[in-house]
Amino acid sequence: MLEKSSERPVDLRSDTVTQPTAAMREAMMAAPLGDDVFGDDPTVNALQERIAGALGFEAALFVPTGTQSNLCAILAHCQRGDEYLVGQMAHCYRWEAGGAAVLGSVQPQPIAHQSDGTLALSDIEAAIKPDDAHFARTRLLALENTLGGSLLPFDYVRAATQLAATRGLSRHLDGARLFNAAVAQAALTGGDAWTEARRIAGCFDSVSVCFSKGLGAPVGSALCGSRALIARAHRIRKMAGGGMRQAGLLAAAALHALDHHVERLADDHALARRLADGLAGIDGLAVQSPQTNIVFADLTGAARDRSAALLQHLAGHGVLATGLYRLRFVTHLDVDAAGVDRAVAATRSFFKH
């Protein structure tokens, strides 16, 4: 029988649980600071210039969270009475408390996903409203890449955003895990992650990038776009309470992450595959093959209603996961191969009962 663990937990709930590395903490403590509300924090300014330039945009805005970044983007693209097209399972529709509708009177028009996470081009086309006083004005297409850990095919991203542009819509990317997508895409093309990130971003008018997930920074996201869009987003950030003072402490962590933690995302992807392979073949557990750093699994048959019991069992053996709607494991820089193997062993022990 597998004994309960007194070791440090293997936390697979999310890649947001990462702790700053020692080198990142040193960079934070050494950062020159100013007042970002006045626009004179040199480290924040350096981060904004760095991420905007790397992704091919004129400007960027550092914000506390990815939720606020998406909110600023949607409200900068749309006005009251407008709508944005978005996937049913997209974070900026399902998991952000309806912020665009509540705070901006911008209506979401959700669209069902295909099995690969894409939105069918025909469904996007059909969702665009005619210019008629009866309807909200369709102004924006919002995509997410990765979506639930799945990479959107680049040819699809290009086709969907070109369709939106031909219909007069702006295009926003929730790229909370853009660099996971870029690393996965680079593995397919033989390119490098930065080139692929810029290729993906180049299909959009704005991109939100999170630094506090796989990149390992403690706080922060950036919204990239044109100077005019970022000027509007800056005002919205202020209204939403997102203005920060000596934020260079946090921006320094993001800069360190961009310098040192992008290419290593491939290690997280490899660990996710190791986890999925270890869980394969368990009677009562259907495991989805991961493309990046997220492994989803569904309990089946007699085990279907035992999700809560499984999570409790795992926690008792020092493994943390989530089961909000499916069982989810997320690998990140604070998880190693030994931790993944512990998670596999703990899961397998549950199904032996």
Image (cartoon, rainbow, N blue to C red):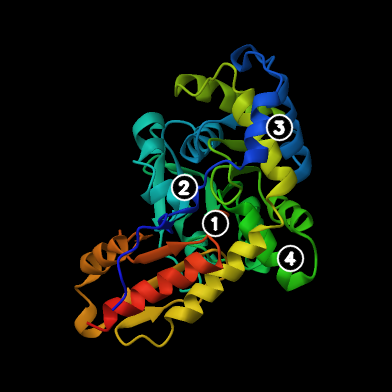
Looking at the image, can residue 48 be seen? yes
The answer to whether the residues at label 3 and label 1 have Cβ atoms under 8 Å apart is no
Circle 3: residue type: Leu
> Could you tell me which secondary element the residue under label 2 belongs to?
helix
Which mark is in front, 2 or 4? 2
Q: Which residue is mark 4?
A: 186
Q: Residue at x 21, y 72 (%)?
A: 306
The answer to whether the residues at label 2 and label 1 have Cβ atoms under 8 Å apart is yes
Classed neighbour count for the residue bearing mark 1: other residues with Cα under 10 Å, few (<14), some (14–19), many (≥20): many
Circle 2: residue type: Val
What is the C-alpha distance between the residues marked 2 and 1? Answer: 9 Å
What is the C-alpha distance between the residues marked 3 and 1? Answer: 23 Å
Q: Which residue is mark 2?
A: 17
Q: Which of marks 4 and 1 precedes in the sequence?
A: 4
Q: Nearer the viewer, residue 104 or 320?
A: 320
Image quarter where the N terminus lies is bottom left
What is the C-alpha distance between the residues marked 3 and 4? Answer: 24 Å
Q: Which of marks 4 and 2 precedes in the sequence?
A: 2
Q: Which of marks 1 and 3 precedes in the sequence?
A: 3
Left or right: residue 280 compared with residue 226: left
Q: Which residue is mark 1?
A: 332
Q: Which of marks 2 and 3 precedes in the sequence?
A: 2
Q: Which of marks 4 and 3 precedes in the sequence?
A: 3
Q: Which residue is mark 3?
A: 47
Classed neighbour count for the residue bearing mark 2: other residues with Cα under 10 Å, few (<14), some (14–19), many (≥20): some
Q: Which of marks 1 and 2 precedes in the sequence?
A: 2
Classed neighbour count for the residue bearing mark 3: other residues with Cα under 10 Å, few (<14), some (14–19), many (≥20): many
The image shows residue 98 at horizontal and vertical percentages of 35, 41
The image shows residue 202 at horizontal and vertical percentages of 73, 50
Q: Residue at x 52, y 63 (%)?
A: 149
